[in-house]
Structures are given as structure tokens and as C-alpha cells.
Amino acid sequence: MEEEGGIGMAQIVLKQIEKSFKQDKVIEGLNLTIEDGSFTVLVGPSGCGKSTTLRMIAGLDKESGGEIWIGDHCVNGVEPGKRNIAMVFQNYALYPMMTVKENIEFGLVNRKVPRTERERLVKEITEVVGLAEYLHKKPQALSGGQRQRVALARAMVKNPGVFLMDEPLSNLDAKLRHQMRTELIQLHKRLGATFVFVTHDQVEAMSMGDRIVIMNKGRIQQADSPMKIYDDPDNVFTAQFIGTPPMNVIDRERILPLLHGQLHDEIGQLGFRPEKATMTTENRPQPGQLQFPARILTRETLGAEIIYQLESALGLVSVKSFLKPLESASEVYISVSMQDLYYFDRGVGLPKQTWLSSPDSSLLSLVLVSVWKGVGYNALIFIAGLQSIPKDVYEASALDEANWWRKFYKITLPMLSPTLFFLIIINLISSFQVFETIAIMTNGGPINSTNTLVFYIYEYGFRYFKIGYASAAGAILLVVVGLLTLVYFKLLSRKVHYQ
């Protein structure tokens, strides 16, 4: 689908992508093709690089190397709003000062879509996601599921070729999460667009994606269909990441005696899935089966299934059983068919999961201008107000193609208004204190204060700041507050696009 100013085809190709944060390389040599119209899930442990990869596709994080192609266009350097993509954030990134309707149509307004067309699109989309009766409510009046639908509607109304979703279900309870999984699958079938979904939950990955990309330490471990990954994992990490409980993996040295020393030299580990094992109280090995004794440590009854944790000469193993529980037994024999064993090469050990450093969340330091005693306290309040604005709200506005002025007066100023009001009151009080101080020091107030005075403000770390006419202090403060707001906004906007 071709949009004005956008990119048409929805196939995504990542070529030798690299990403570094300071000295830490978190993505290295990543190559991936996401087919047009597919539902691709990026899954892996925390810090594996899946969200960073998604954000580079969106243009919210700048790649350190490599090329990103959407359709026939290389989008390196292309603004997020021009990539023909829409994104649903983990925390929804709704504009709190806008109604549901205003949230959904914000991107359309920025693209100057005619009012009648906006009304038609909003009506059509809200009926699909079940929000028609909530159009005039604000996000804080909605439940988690309703906020999620607003975020989806805001993405859908752009009619993008690619939907990017960064763990959008993680804040929902289990029941609602299951419901939303079903709705997203149906939505994908209805729209036929390319979906790229990030999650750390293997259940979400297996149940939703037609293609799963498993990542660890910034590298792709395996990219395949859900059943291919489950039935034929490429390595130990993939084998143990997919499946609940994880696959039992046994070192060569422990299992070799059970196989009478008959194991190929290249094989370093063997594995079997807990659901492929059976338990019995009798020692009756069958041909073609591996059997060994074990002692039951724990039983987890989960309705139709029971998960056993057992101790054996092979180490701790798990068994998932759908049969009647062995209530009285503690000593059992575990049997596994030789056909259900997985063989892993030497050297393919279980990767240790490490926390990768995340990008520094703080923005560039703001230059604070002091105009009277007490500036430190005022600056802390002001910075706290600025930092309270969620970064993902700005990122969402970038995807909605809002220009800097609309971001400033539609997002920054409304969300800063309580802080600004509080600051103005405090600073007006402070201005009277400054006026009084100058009046005392000049024996007559501002009429005689034509000469510049110097105040030594030790308690807040500022020294030698020169103040002229006390009567101008209030006006100077308001100008400074406005300038600082603009500086913060421009720095944050640049951070969103080019960090």
C-alpha cells in the first residue's frame, strides 16, 4: 500500500545491523528478512536486543551500522513518521491531555487529512476495536484493556504497511492478555499487514506468530515456524527457551554410562522434553528406550497436567504428565524413547543470560540560569516536572508526524502546566524577597539600583551571578522558564530521532 510521503511495500530486510551504546555493542551482524504480511515475533530474555531491533526498524533508535530496508527503500535516516509504520508501545504512550478520539486522529490531523475523512476513519476503526462509546473519555478514565485498544486504533487509523508492537500485553492480567492475543491474531488476518511483535513470553510467541525469531545477546539463535523451533531446535539455548518446563539437557559424561559408551564423539549434550518422558514404579526397560531411576522432589498440579521435579544420577530433571498422579510413590523410573532424544554438538553449551546495558535514559544536561536566591530549589522542581513527561509520548508523536511546534504546545506545555504554575507562584514570592534584599542594599530600591549588584549564592552552588533591576526579575524568570522548556523539548526530540 502506498501512502503519500511514505513507503509502500511492507517486507522488512535487516542487513548486517549493528548497535552500540557507548562502548557496549548490543547488536552485532544481525541479518533478518521479515516477509510482507507475516506475523513475526521477536522473543528472547531481557536484554537480548529484541526491543532495540524493533526501535531501529521504527527509526526511534539509530543503527550504528548496516542497512534497514522497508520494501524497496533503504530507510536509514528516514524519519519515523515517513516509514509507513505504526507502533504500539508497552506503556501505550497515549496523550493524557487528549480524549480517545483526539488520540486516535492526532496523526491524521498532523498529515492534514480533511475533517470528514478523519471522522469516517475514526468511526470505522473504533467500531472494529469496540471503542465507539469511549470517544470523549480521556485515557485515565479507561481500563488497561481499553487503553490498549486506543493504542491499537491509533496505529490502525494510519493504515500502515507495518505494525510494530513492543510487549503490548505485558501490563494486562492473564485473562485479558489471552483475550487480546486472540483479538490481535484476528486483526492481523483482517488487515493483512506485516506485524512485528516483541515479547519475552514464549507462550505469546508460540500462539501468535507464524514465524518466531529467537534472540540472545544481540544475535539470532533461530528464525523459523513455531513448530519447527519446537521440534527441531538449532541449539541448546533455543531448546531450553521454548517449552514449559524447559527441555532437560544432560551432559555427555553423565549419560554415557546409560548408553554403554556408544555415543558419537561430536555429541556433547543430550536433551529430552518433559512431556516426552513417562514414569513408572517398575524397572522394566523396553527396547529403544532410555530408562533411569529418579526420586520425586516436588509435584505441581496444574489441572489436567502435573509437573514433577526429580533428582537422578543425570541431575535434576522435569517430567510433565497427563496421567493419574503417583501420590504415594517417591522412587520411580523415568523412560524416554530414543527417538525423542535431541543431540547437541560439543561446544554448544547453554549461553549464560546476561543483562545488557540499556541506553542512558537521561537527556543532555540543561543549562540552568539563576536569577535569584533559591534557584537550586526551583531548578529541581522544574527538572522533576520535565523528567515526568514519558519519553514514549514523544516517540508516539514522532510516529504521528507531529512537527516541533505541535509537540511543544499539544504535549509539552499541557503536561508541564502544573509544574509551571507551581514554579511561577514560588518565583513570584522569591522575587519579592529579592526586591526586598536589593532595596535594603541600595537604600531605596530599584530606583537607585541602576548599578549591577553581585549576589553570592553559596547554598545552591551558584556564585557571582549578576542581577540588575529587581523589577525585571519576574519577567526574566518567565523568559528563562520558557527558554528552558524549548531547549528541553528540542533535546528530547533529537534524542528520540538520533540517539
Image: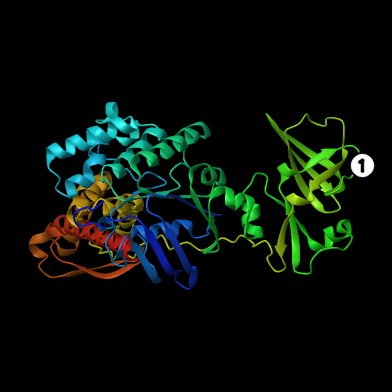
- Where is the C terminus found, in terms of image quarters? bottom left
- Outermost residue to the left: 447
Report whether residue 224 is seen: yes
Task: Identify the residue at image location x=41%, y=39%.
Answer: 184
> Relative to 285, is 360 above or below?
below
Point out residue 33 in the picture as x, y percentages from the top left corner.
43, 60
Residue type indicated by callout 1: Asn
Number of marks present in the image shown? 1
> Relative to 311, is 128 above or below?
above
Looking at the picture, tell me which residue is in the foreground, 178 or 278.
278
Point out residue 325 in the picture as x, y percentages from the top left corner.
79, 30
Tag 1 secondary structure: loop
Residue where numbered disc 1 is placed: 283
Point out residue 4 in the picture as x, y percentages from the top left corner.
18, 54
On the picture, is 101 further left or further right than 17?
Answer: left
* Colouring: rainbow
Looking at the picture, tell me which residue is in the foreground, 480 or 20.
20
